[in-house]
Structures are given as structure tokens and as C-alpha cells.
Image (tube, coloured by chain):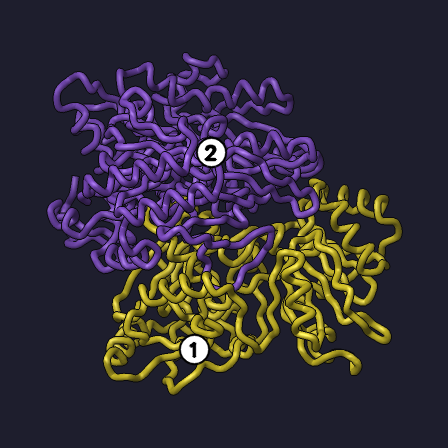
Chain colours: A yellow, B purple
């Protein structure tokens, strides 16, 4: 049981609570100058998204560093140790009618808060409720010198010093080891509904474009297998009103189970699990401006190997021709990433990212699957 | 930082080649407007002001300055409140005020791409024809520029619901200290690797010069309603704020004023605030008509249950504007109470509000200077306005010292020394209180990674360890004081 001085409602309990801060700091300090590199490890639920780190390294395991340290629903903030499981955080929040606005994917129930920040992946609500980085308020961390540091805090507005907390989003452990994280949380909308429209990809993008500028409580879009799924979330009245307006605008619609969005978020849809036999085995994550045209090279005998989220801003596709996908992403001003392959960054970005890495870890104590020297 | 005179002469020649005649200012009369920003108490005449009209010129100026080791002080509209654009007497003020083009408004992506000198309000004006607007609304929005907003991570009165600048900027083009162009983000919802875009927001022009910004736009809400509530006890008002949020309602804005501020605002703007209230709360709700009916009813009931003795609900634009007018004129109204005032910018967890206000009251009595409190209650951002008279010897110093004491209280409450105004030069000393020497050293190493020569806005944002050492700084973090058993006043 976690005793929290700040938590005014003691009606929940954290299952695993353990503070390993001192041991973790010691481990980093011991690694300095020993020639041993440390790879920060959470549950490993996201690690397959990047190639294995090069060289020999030891693992510094955060999974045992757990516990929700503070949760104040009236402040909309939660602080937890980095090894705390996301499912536990979600359950504590749901108990008070709150949630993580950016819907982090949970690929495995063991998935941790630290891994969520390190990978920086946001879920279906991203264009409307923000990304992981938008909810980051503060961190505690250990840098490569073995120093224990705190940045940001537990308040929404904070411009004291550089924003090291948000910088850590997507850093995959290159900028030090996060030990605790404070997030801004969000009320669960009182009413949620999902509408499904039959339409092809082109029409779905046009429909998303048409409703993009309207003040409706849209919280998710997904096109797949000739169906456009729209999710509305907000007050009862707002959702009802928007639903009527959308049905009038986009013709017939069928209601659909909300479970779909969890399956989409956590990649449990068949699209991710069991791709069609005639599809390529390479899954691309293509981030584009929402209004970008579709790629012309996609082929599928029955079903197009394509799934579109974020009102058009995120496109998952299976394709073998790397050059074609890259050319497409570049032509629309976006970027693409083949899962399991290095994260694509421009040479100049990598150079500055690498300099920042050196600023946090001058002796290269940490080793990460995110490699800034790749392709330089 | 000492600058070589030969270098200065050579640089001036180069600047005159890069820019049109009126783009390089060297005469005293022309330099005068640049000697200060919104923090007018601190002044310094710059050596030269350079006013580029495009990114290419910015690159060339930065490269020339780097070659001659001359510091660069980036400047937007000069409305910043912490002295972030205070000039360097041997340096170049790089004013982005001529880069004012709105390059693209994309209705489908709900985004706009603009140059850094575009005024905050001008973005919403341009997007308005598409039914869209740019959400962050610092009080200086009619004058301040988006480049400056990025530099300071500007806030406003709608931050709890719609976020700060960092939450509404999707991309920037950054000219680095060596004159390279670093593209961070774009018209995209996601970018690979560590979030350098977030790092740039709020970095006070110390990591690079922003030459283009892509911002997110939002559809105008269908409707809004404004409630004004008066309380006899400021603790009740604070509890009402916490409970509205705990109920799952995120107001578009929620502002509080104490009696001193509300009375001054009422006498100035005739907003209809009762003069006997210990605290006034203004709550703006937005959304669909149906949503507002539901939320306004719930908020009204919550206000009553927290002993609001007067609640006014305004659904019409004229009454809404009248209620807001008081709040929006609070600063000039308070300005009539004394020859000078100092505006502080601490942020605290909301539930510590009553405690902090009592501490401010005590400090005010001890120092013998009055304070009026204006508070972005929704996000815990407190603006105590310390009243003083700069013509009375010692009062300016006393006001500054008092401000520092208030900020230390904010840190002790688990908050921060600056919510939205930035550190600039104003809060360098209190940074020593908020951060440990290891943390400050980490900030310096981060700065060196982006600007190894230290040419971009030197002396701002992060204090040197020597400075903190000279202050004998007491480091307080997350409410943990050294020797907590000792009383401190």
C-alpha cells in the first residue's frame, strides 16, 4: 500500500511499490569509467520497434522501481515512478473518472510509464487532445554522471529553465534514466460514441478534411477496409448534437462498439497482427500532413494494406519498396519509419541530438537502440 | 563577454552589406527604443540593432556575428516581462519585427505557417475567415509576436483547456548559433527522436533563432458563457476552483482577483464587481449550446455550495465583455494605486492557493508594501502586483526583495518561480533557489551543446554557479527545505 500525503482519497491501493532510486544511482555511478554500458530497460514492450543496440551492454532494469507517488484529481496531475505499469496508472485514474489524454499504446500489460515516455508514442486522440509530450509536466532523472536531477514540476505552467521534461519524450533513453514522471491528466468524457461510414480511402480523407474545421467533439478517426470510424467524446448534449450533424453530412452511419479504439491503440486489430497473405511483411508508420494525398503505389487483392488515423495525419501501410515509401513521405512533407528499423532523422537533426546526448551523458554510460551515429 | 573592437568594426561593415540601409541601426536615437523590453526597470543601450527581412539574412547575420564573436540578442516585439530581450552593450540586437508574413493557412490540417514577427492576434485574424483561431492568448496578444511567444513559451488566460505555446506549436525553423537551419517538426502531429521542438519553446532565444513557426489552429467554439462569482472568503473561492476541476469540468478560463485587485478593476472599468468581495472569480465555459447548458448549471451549483454570495451568468457578448473588461484592465487599474508596480509570475498547485495568499499578505505587512493579486486560477499561475514608488529611495530594492520572497514561497508550495513570463534577467537569482547546482550545470551543458561559443543571448535564463554562490543561495526543491524545523519568515 502506498501512503501518499497528497492523495486525499485513500480508496485505492498500488500493488507494487518500491523505491530503487539509490540503487539505480549507484549502478550508474559504478558503470562510469568501468567501460560497461547500460541499456535502460522497461518491460521491453516497445523495444522491438527499433533494431537491437550495438555492442556489449548490461541492462539497468526499471521494472522494479514502481509506485504512484502522488495523485490529485483536483490538480489534474499524477506522479509515478518510471517502472510503474501503465495499466495500474490507467486504473487509478479511471477510478477517479480521469485518463491519460494521449491514449498511450499498451502492447503488453507489463508496459511501463518510463517506456511510454522514452518511445513517445501517442494514441488515436493525438490531434485533438495532444501527444505524450503535451502532458509531460516534470521528471526526476539520473544523468550519465550519476547525478540525480529534477526538472519541471507538478504545475501546468512552468518556464523556469529549459524544458528538459518534454525533451525526454521520444529520446529512448539517450538523455539519461528517468526515475519519476509527472503527467497532466484529463477527465474522461461523460459520453462517447463511435460512428462507422462505408467509404473508400479517398472519400474518407475528404470527409475528415470537411469536418476538420468544425467545432465538433471529435476524439479519433480511423479508416480501414473501406470503413471510416469516427469517435465523439464530450458531454451528452455535445455528442448527440455532433452525431446528428455528422450523419446528415456524411449520410448513413452505424453505431459501433468503443472497444475498437482500444484495439486500434494497442495494435490488436487484425491489420497489425495478421496481415493479408498478399501484403508485404514490412509495416511502415508514415506521418504526413493530414490533408496529404494518398500514395499511388498501394495494391491489395481484396483489401488495401493501409490504415489511416489522426484525421489523415498517420498512415500505417505494408509495402516492400523502401524507396517508394520514402519518396512518398518526402513528397508530402512527412516522414516514414519501417518498424524494427532505425528511426529516421535528418543528418543535421542527428548531429544536434547527439550533442544533447553528450550533454547529458558525456562518458557514454548509457546505450540506446536509438543510434544518432547511424547514417552520418 | 568582451568583444574585440576590430571585430565590431568589421562586423558592422558586413551587416551593412547584408541588410538594406534602414536595416542596421547605430545612432543613439534609433537605438533608444531597443534599450529595454516589457521589464522597463532594466535598461541597456545596444551596440547595433539589425533588422533582417528573411531567413537568409538571419543566417548571414548569425554567421557574421559568430565569425567575429559578437553576441546576438534576439528580439520579437519587445513585450516580454522578464528582460529576456535586454540588450548587450557590445552585442547585436537581432529584431525579427520585419518578418511578418503569414505564409500559409491550412484549413484541413488546421495549421498556419508564419514568420516570427507575425503578431499573435494577427494569426487568429487571418484564420478567422476559415472559422479557426490560434488559442494561446497572452495579455499582450495584440502586440506580441509569435517568435517571442515561442521564446518565452507564452501562456494566457485559456491555458488549462487549450495549453501553452508549446502545446500549440507543431514546428519551427531554427537558425542555430553557427548559422545552420534546423527544421523541427512541421505540419505534422509527431516527430522522431527527442523532442527538440519542445526544448526550443521557452528557451528565451538562447538555443537558436526561430525564423518560421507552424502553429495549430482550432475551430471557434459554437458558444460561450461567462460566470462571475463573488466570495466573502478567499478560501471558499479557492475551494470552488479545485472542485469545479475535480468534477471533470475544464473551463476555457478561470480567473481570480483579490479584493485589492477587484476593487481597483471595478473603479477603473465598471465591470459590475461587488466592492465588498474578498475574491472575485470569473469562469468562461465554451462548447456546444447543449454542453454549456449542462456545464453552466453544474458550475453554478458548485459556486453556490462554496458560499458564493453573488453569481452572475452572462450569455450575451456585451455582458461577457463587461465582466472580462474588469479582469483585463486589472493591471492598468492597479497601476493607478501607486506610481510603480512589479508583476510577479509564480505558479503553485491550486490547492495551496489560500496558504500562499496568506503568506503574501504577511510578507506585504513585513515589507510595508501593498500587493494586489491577480490569478490565473485554472492553472495555478499567480500574478501578485507589488505596489511601490521608485522615487522613494530603497523602495525598488524592497519591492524586488519582496518579489523574491514570494517566489520562494511558491517553490516551497511545490510550484515554480515563473509560469509564463520567463526567467530573462529578472529571475536569475531565484533560479538559484529552485535548482540545485547539478541541475544548473546540466542546463549549462545543454546550452553549450546548442551554442558552444555562448553567443546567443548570453547572461539570460540560467544563472552561473558563481552568481548563485555569491548569493549564498538556499536551494529549495519540491517543498523540501534544508532544516525544515526552522521557522522562516
What residue does disc 1 label? A41
User: Which residue is painted at 45% across and 32% down in the image?
Assistant: B97
Q: Say whether residue B178 is left or right of residue B433.
A: right
Q: Residues within 10 Å of mark 1 (few under 14, many from 20)?
A: many
Q: Which mark is residue B168?
A: none
What number of labels is visible?
2
Q: Is residue A262 above or below residue B392?
A: below
User: Which residue is painted at 65% across and 62% down in the image?
Assistant: A329
Q: Quadrant of residue B448?
A: bottom left
Q: Dot 1 lies on which element?
A: strand
Q: Position of residue A207 (x, y in %)?
A: 79, 50
Q: Quadrant of the N terminus of chain B?
A: top left
Q: Which mark is residue B145?
A: 2
Q: Quadrant of residue B286?
A: top right
Q: Are marks 1 and 2 on the same chain?
A: no
Which residue extends farthest right? A252
Q: Say whether residue A94 is left or right of residue A253.
A: left
Q: Is residue A64 above or below residue B213?
A: below
Q: Is residue B155 above or below residue B308?
A: below
User: Which residue is painted at 67% across and 78% down in the image?
Assistant: A282
Front disc: 1 or 2? 2
Who is closer to the viewer here, A37 or A191? A37
Q: Position of residue B271 (x, y in %)?
A: 49, 16
The chain carrying label 1 is A
Q: Is residue A220 above or below residue B6?
A: below
Residue A200 seen anywhere in this rendered image of the structure: yes
Amino acid at each position: 500500500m502506498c501512503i501518499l500525503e497528497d492523495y486525499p482519497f485513500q480508496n485505492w491501493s498500488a500493488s507494487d511499490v518500491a523505491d530503487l532510486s539509490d540503487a539505480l544511482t549507484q549502478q550508474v555511478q559504478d558503470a562510469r569509467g568501468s567501460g560497461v554500458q547500460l541499456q535502460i530497460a522497461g518491460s521491453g514492450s516497445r523495444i522491438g520497434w527499433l533494431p537491437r543496440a550495438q555492442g556489449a551492454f548490461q541492462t539497468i532494469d526499471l521494472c522494479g522501481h514502481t509506485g504512484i507517488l502522488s495523485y490529485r484529481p483536483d490538480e489534474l496531475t499524477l506522479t509515478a515512478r518510471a517502472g510503474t505499469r501503465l495499466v495500474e496508472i490507467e486504473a487509478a485514474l479511471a477510478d477517479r473518472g480521469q485518463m491519460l489524454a494521449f491514449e498511450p499504446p499498451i502492447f503488453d500489460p507489463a508496459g511501463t510509464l518510463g517506456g511510454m515516455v522514452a518511445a513517445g508514442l501517442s494514441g488515436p486522440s493525438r490531434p485533438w487532445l495532444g501527444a505524450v509530450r503535451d502532458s509531460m509536466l516534470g521528471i526526476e532523472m539520473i544523468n550519465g554522471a550519476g547525478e540525480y536531477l529534477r526538472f519541471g514540476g507538478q504545475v501546468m505552467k512552468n518556464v523556469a529553465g529549459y524544458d528538459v521534461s518534454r525533451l525526454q519524450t521520444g529520446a529512448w533513453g539517450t538523455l539519461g534514466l528517468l526515475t519519476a514522471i509527472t503527467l497532466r491528466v484529463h477527465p474522461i468524457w461523460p459520453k462517447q460514441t463511435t460512428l462507422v461510414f462505408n467509404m473508400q480511402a479517398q472519400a474518407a480523407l475528404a470527409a475528415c478534411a470537411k469536418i476538420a474545421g468544425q467545432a465538433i467533439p471529435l476524439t479519433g478517426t480511423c479508416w480501414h477496409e473501406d470503413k471510416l470510424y469516427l469517435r465523439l467524446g464530450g458531454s451528452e448534449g455535445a455528442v448527440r448534437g455532433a452525431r446528428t450533424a455528422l450523419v446528415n453530412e456524411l449520410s448513413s452511419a452505424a453505431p459501433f462498439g468503443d472497444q475498437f479504439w482500444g484495439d486500434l491503440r494497442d495494435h490488436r486489430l487484425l491489420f497489425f497482427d495478421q496481415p493479408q497473405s498478399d501484403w508485404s511483411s514490412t509495416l511502415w508508420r508514415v506521418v504526413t500532413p493530414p490533408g496529404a494525398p494518398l500514395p499511388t503505389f498501394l495494391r491489395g487483392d481484396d483489401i488495401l494494406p493501409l490504415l489511416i488515423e489522426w484525421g489523415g495525419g498517420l498512415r500505417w501501410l505494408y509495402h516492400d519498396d523502401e524507396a517508394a515509401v520514402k519518396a512518398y513521405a518526402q513528397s508530402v512533407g512527412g516522414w516514414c519509419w519501417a518498424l524494427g528499423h532505425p528511426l529516421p532523422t535528418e543528418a543535421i537533426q542527428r548531429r544536434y541530438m547527439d550533442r544533447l546526448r553528450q550533454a547529458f551523458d558525456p562518458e557514454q554510460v548509457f546505450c540506446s537502440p536509438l543510434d544518432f551515429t547511424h547514417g552520418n | 563577454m568582451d568583444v574585440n573592437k576590430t571585430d565590431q568594426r568589421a562586423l558592422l561593415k558586413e551587416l551593412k552589406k547584408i541588410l538594406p540601409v534602414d536595416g542596421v541601426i547605430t545612432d543613439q536615437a534609433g537605438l533608444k527604443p531597443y534599450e529595454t523590453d516589457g521589464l522597463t526597470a532594466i535598461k541597456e543601450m545596444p551596440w547595433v540593432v539589425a533588422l533582417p527581412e528573411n531567413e537568409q539574412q538571419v543566417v548571414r547575420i548569425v554567421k557574421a556575428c559568430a565569425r567575429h564573436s559578437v553576441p546576438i540578442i534576439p528580439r520579437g516585439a519587445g513585450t516580454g516581462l522578464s528582460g529576456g530581450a535586454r540588450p548587450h552593450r557590445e552585442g547585436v540586437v537581432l529584431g525579427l519585427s520585419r518578418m511578418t508574413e503569414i505564409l500559409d493557412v491550412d484549413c484541413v490540417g488546421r495549421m498556419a505557417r508564419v514568420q516570427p514577427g507575425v503578431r499573435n492576434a494577427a494569426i487568429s485574424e487571418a484564420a478567422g475567415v476559415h472559422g479557426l483561431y490560434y488559442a494561446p492568448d497572452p495579455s499582450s496578444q495584440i502586440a506580441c509576436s509569435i517568435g517571442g511567444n515561442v521564446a518565452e513559451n507564452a501562456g494566457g488566460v485559456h491555458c488549462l483547456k487549450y495549453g501553452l505555446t508549446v502545446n500549440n506549436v507543431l514546428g519551427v525553423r531554427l537558425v542555430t548559433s553557427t548559422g545552420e537551419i534546423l527544421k523541427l517538426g512541421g505540419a505534422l502531429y509527431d516527430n522522431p527522436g527527442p523532442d527538440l521542438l519542445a526544448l526550443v519553446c521557452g528557451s528565451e532565444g538562447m538555443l537558436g533563432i526561430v525564423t518560421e513557426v507552424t502553429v495549430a489552429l482550432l475551430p471557434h467554439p459554437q458558444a460561450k458563457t461567462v460566470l462571475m462569482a463573488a466570495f466573502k472568503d478567499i478560501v471558499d473561492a479557492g475551494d470552488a476552483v479545485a472542485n469545479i476541476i475535480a468534477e471533470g469540468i475544464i473551463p476555457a478560463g478561470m480567473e481570480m482577483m483579490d479584493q485589492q485587485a477587484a476593487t481597483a478593476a471595478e473603479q477603473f472599468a465598471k465591470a459590475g464587481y461587488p466592492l465588498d468581495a474578498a475574491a472575485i472569480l470569473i469562469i468562461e465555459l465554451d462548447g456546444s449550446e447543449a454542453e454549456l447548458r449542462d456545464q453552466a448549471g453544474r458550475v453554478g451549483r458548485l459556486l453556490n455550495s462554496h458560499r458564493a454570495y453573488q453569481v452572475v451568468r452572462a450569455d450575451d457578448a456585451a455582458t461577457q465583455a463587461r465582466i472580462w473588461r474588469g479582469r483585463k484592465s486589472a493591471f492598468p487599474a492597479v497601476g493607478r494605486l501607486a506610481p510603480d508596480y512589479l508583476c510577479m509570475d509564480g505558479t503553485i498547485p491550486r490547492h495551496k492557493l489560500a496558504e500562499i495568499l496568506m503568506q503574501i499578505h504577511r510578507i506585504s505587512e513585513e515589507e510595508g508594501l501593498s500587493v494586489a493579486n491577480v490569478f490565473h486560477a485554472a492553472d495555478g499561475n499567480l500574478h501578485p502586483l507589488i505596489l511601490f514608488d521608485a522615487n522613494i529611495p530603497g523602495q525598488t530594492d524592497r519591492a524586488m526583495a519582496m518579489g523574491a520572497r514570494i517566489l520562494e514561497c511558491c517553490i516551497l508550495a511545490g510550484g515554480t518561480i515563473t509560469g509564463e513570463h520567463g526567467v530573462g534577467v529578472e529571475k536569475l537569482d531565484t533560479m538559484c533557489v529552485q535548482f540545485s547546482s547539478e541541475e544548473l550545470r546540466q542546463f549549462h551543458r545543454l546550452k553549450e551543446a546548442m551554442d558552444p561559443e555562448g553567443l546567443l543571448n548570453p547572461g539570460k535564463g540560467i544563472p552561473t554557479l558563481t552568481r548563485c554562490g555569491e548569493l549564498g543561495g538556499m536551494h529549495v526543491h519540491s517543498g523540501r527545505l534544508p532544516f525544515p524545523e526552522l521557522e522562516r519568515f
